[in-house]
Image (spheres, helix red, strand yellow):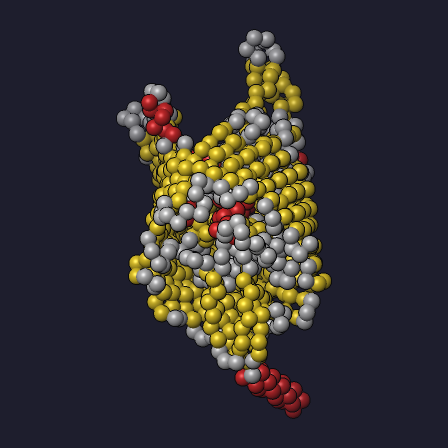
Amino acid sequence: MILHFKIKTHSIICLIFLLCSTLNYAQQNYKLDGYVKDQTDALPGATVQVIEANLAAMTDSAGYFTFTLRAGTYTLKTSYVGYDTSTQTIVVKEATSIQTKLVSSASKLNEVVIVQNSKKTDIRKPEMSINKLSISDVKKMPVVLGETDVLKSILQMPGVTNAGEGAAGFNVRGGSAGQNLVLLDDAPVYSSSHLFGFFSVFNSDAIKDLKLYKGGIPSRFGGRASSVLEVFQTDGKLDDYHATGGIGIISSRAKFEGPIQKGKSSFFLAGRASYAHLFLKLSDNKNSAYFYDLNTRLNFDLNAKNKLTFSGYFGRDIFSFTDLLKNNFGNTVGSLQWHHLFSDSLSSRMTLNYSDYIYGLELDLVGFKWDSNIKNFQFKYDFTHDVIPNLQLKYGLSTQYYNFSPGIMKPTKPDSQINYRKLDNKYALENAVYIEAEQNIGQHFSLNYGLRFSSFSNIGKETINLYENNQPVWYDKELGLYKMADYIGKQTYASGKTIQNYNNFEPRIGLAYIINDEQSIKASYNRMAQYLHLISNTAAPTPLDIWTPSSKYLKPEIVDQVALGYFHNFKEAKYSLETEVFYKTGKNKVDYIDGAELIGNEALERVILVGESRAYGLELMVRKNLGKLTGWVAYTLSKSEQRTPGRTADEPGINQGKWYRTAYDKTHDLSITAMYDLSTKWNFGASFTYQTGRPATFPDGQFDYLGNRIPTFGARNSNSLPAFHHLDISATYTPNPTSRKNWRSEWVFGIYNLYGRSNAASISFRENADIKGQNEAVRMSVFGIVPSVTYNFKF
């Protein structure tokens, strides 16, 4: 007992001494905080460096940063993608606040020589596996149908692919499209594409920039197993009213912005719509496909310590095939944020999010209508705390409520064979707390480490099926097939009652070893838990895919990823080299039994088996940052596989329990992007993409049964579609680049798929109509050569 008292007393004395030392240390320091913006908007994610103190920080979502420094004179260097770097000398002898305005590289006149640039690789920060793009760069990249596309631009980054032309979603480092968390001003977006992948839901006029985390994901993010894509909307101008727009062959757009109260509050409202279906009506074509969307953002600087913002998005897609089929889907998103500065060292952001994704189908032929949706409400409270000069903490909590409506089926004709049926809604709660730290240790080490604890509860009101041995899928040994098990009873849970609960710790760490000012080696590890599952048996997501929560029979997917990279700026940062290797493993990977039916299935667990996944690869990117010619070359060599072994020794599992390629495995992926400023009037862009063909399963034989030819198939995904590649070019002409008039305009000319490559979206097999018994493969392609022209204006 005496020994215990002495040890305890000694510990208390040490703790008091440590606290006194810290307080004494803090008294010798002063707070330097600031706000980074351009002519209009705050710049979240800008890098601010204090050269003499070897410190670096990134601005938060409102553009703020803070440091704690001893009294003295410092050089402050501020950089941001697409903007010239700012260098300032700051004298700190008391608490100091500054405002830094950055100038867009694209807005400068020809005679201005750019010495600094912010496109170079950040050597010192411990973050890796991250790609940033400014909207000015995105607008220079040629895309299909003449529409600037945020999502298509990230496909030019290493480690990012899609399922082909006209395919929705994107895949990151061998993960599925449903494993990507897409955030618009911090609110989740469930579908990121219009017209089945032809367009992005993000209007380029409404977007400021974007940031994609492929690995080394900070602890403040969670809920998806593969990546996080942050998209930030512009703030709207505080000084005067302006309009921006564009008129294209397929779609047009417009944006209006200006002050609500000059200097203190602002708004913007942007809209976009396609109208190709109107031309179809002129030719008596009853098919139709179009979309429209609206973006808005309101900003209120209440006072020096409080800022309020509201962001909103609404979009819809309408598709019909004559009178036989009608399809509509879209997102509704709203986000309210309150930024508050408690003190020089502590700030916060409180967020309320709402997201609603609807998808529906109507088949007139059978008199059938199906509607479904997913809604979620989210509350987040995040804090940024500068503890000491070399240590910044971020911590917070979040809670989300989900309401899944798997489907309502209605008859639309008196003679319809479909009866009204409503599948039971599913409800869930997802909670999380996190803490992360960014710390500099000496001149050579920088760390970002943290921990996230997440909890997920599948709750009532819901009635679930009960199965023998808790197995919703059973194996028929005689036929050698997996089948849906019969339920042996049902159990009803009252509203709010917990059906199944899951808890997970998700550690994250990133380390940078700074060799010198131009070179560093970085490593990272992160674990991600995903509690929502995108149920889809296609390679690319479609509007009819189903989101469903983890439940009694469906466990959350857990993914671990490690990465190692080397980063180098050379020739005074004119060129940058980024190279990384990564390895990912996952468990509880969803797979489907043969013949699985998903639409209208009220017991999805009866067609699902779970297995494991793995992905690994090498990524390389060489970037030219300065000069009239800029751009990058990105190459990825990777492998993505999954395996679903049998649950017992008597079961073969899927594909005989062997590893097989996932639907998004691409061995080789090469992207070349170039942008050339010929003069103030003309600039050009070009991009080339090459990818290994998407995995597929082709027939390897056939047999006759009662006069019918029945194909047989080999191992799952053991074949490949032909290689995918195309070259796109664009030219932008600005008639009066130095005009001081209110009206300014430009013409954008583009050609997608310049050499007319017929890339295979799919390959089907059929019997030749002229030669009996002779089979043939039929390739389906989406695009040939697609020219486009768009007229953009602003005033």
Residue 461 position within the rendered picture, expressed as x and y whole percent measured from the top left: 38, 51
Farthest residue to the front: give it. 111
User: Quick one: 197 or 682, which is closer to the camera?
Assistant: 682
Q: Is residue 745 above or below residue 74?
A: above
User: Quick one: 565 or 674, which is closer to the camera?
Assistant: 674
Residue 347 position within the rendered picture, expressed as x and y whole percent measured from the top left: 46, 70
- 378 vs 658, left or right, is left
- 82 vs 328, left or right, is right
Farthest residue to the right: give it. 515
For the point 48% across and 34% down, the residue is: 749
Q: Quadrant of residue 124?
A: bottom right
Say if residue 339 shows up in the picture: yes
- 429 vs 637, left or right, is left
Total marks shown come to: 0
For the point 58% across and 32% down, the residue is: 726
Residue 203 position within the rendered picture, expressed as x and y whole percent measured from the top left: 42, 44
Say if residue 213 shows up in the picture: no
For the point 45% across and 55% down, the residue is: 186
Q: Quadrant of residue 529?
A: bottom right
Residue 449 position within the rendered picture, expressed as x and y whole percent measured from the top left: 60, 64
Farthest residue to the left: give it. 414
User: Quick one: 593 or 664, which is closer to the camera?
Assistant: 664
For the point 58% across and 70% down, the residue is: 75
Quarter of the image with the N terminus is bottom right
